[in-house]
Amino acid sequence: MFINDFKPTQFKLTAVSPLFWRVAFNNPPVNVIGPAMIGELKQLLTELETNQEVNVVVFESADPDFFLAHYDLAADPAIAEALPSPTGYAAWVDVLVRLSRVPAVTISAIRGIARGAGSEFVLASDMRFASREKTILGQMEVGFTALPGGGAGGRLPALVGRGRTFEILLGGEDYSAELAEKYGYVNRSVPDVDFEAFITAYATRVSKWDRRVIAEIKHFVNKYTILPDSEYPLHSDAFWGAAARPQFQSISSQLFEQGLQTRGELEYNLGRDIGEIFPKAGL
């Protein structure tokens, strides 16, 4: 049985019941998304695509400060791209497109920071609930001289509208749970003291509905709100094209010198501090 045989290192998979699974990300120090996590998510998605029992999967974090910080900019992207891709798309696009299409209802229970690819992950899930006191969301790629590579520009407009999508992507700033709720970036924010109980109760309730009804609801909502899958590789190509340029590499290098991907002030305040970093002169 998959739930017993699968031994991921980047997250913990728990079966609350045959109908309800939980995935808790755990990749210290700040839950970056690298090749190992992508590989394990691909394996999980392969199971969920054919599993006939699981109705709800909650994605959460074992770290109360970081849900998914962002993509691992220190990793060799070729490692992730060498992994199997059932869609034929780039590694991260493959994960997000498949996540948005699995039969089970996917819920991101966000407690902590979810920026960049972390924000893209929650956008690709069916629902997003946020701890009111602990959640920070943002797409800071503009500060790296790039657009989001995982399709935030394609998913946000259906949630927040055109103008607010421009605000989020062009500002590159952090959004609190309360503002994210107001904009539609998340379904709702919940006081942290009530957060766990709310998530468990809601997921348990939904998990007990008839599987056919869940599938039909997802089919029609997805039909009217999700772009064709073939649109998302365009975002990835643009991101990796930008990542190869000297300007992007200059900014990344400066950020690593200041503590990027370590548990320090920069990662907590990246949405603010990215606005103070620019490519070195002459690039």
Image: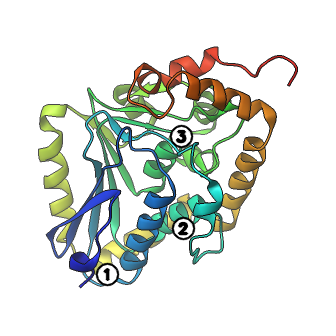
Q: Is residue 209 positioned above or below 127 on the image?
A: below
Mark 2–mark 3 contact, CB under 8 Å? Answer: no
Mark 2–mark 1 contact, CB under 8 Å? Answer: no
Q: Residue at x 61, y 27 (%)?
A: 167
Q: How far is disc 1 from disc 3 in space, using C-alphas?
A: 34 Å
Q: Which residue is mark 2?
A: 223
Res. 4 image quadrant: bottom left
Q: Residue at x 65, y 74 (%)?
A: 88
Res. 178 image quadrant: top left
Q: Position of residue 77 (x, y in %)?
A: 63, 55
Discs 2/3, front = 3
Give the residue type that dot 1 points to: Arg
Q: Which residue is mark 1?
A: 212
Give the residue type that dot 3 points to: Gly
Q: Residue at x 40, y 57 (%)?
A: 126
Q: Earlier in the sequence, mark 2 or mark 3?
A: 3
Q: Position of residue 58 (x, y in %)?
A: 28, 57
Q: Position of residue 238 (x, y in %)?
A: 75, 49
In the rendered view, how is the structure colored?
A: rainbow
Residue placed most toward the observer, 183 or 100: 100
Give the residue type that dot 2 points to: Lys
Q: Is residue 161 positioned above or below 220 on the image?
A: above
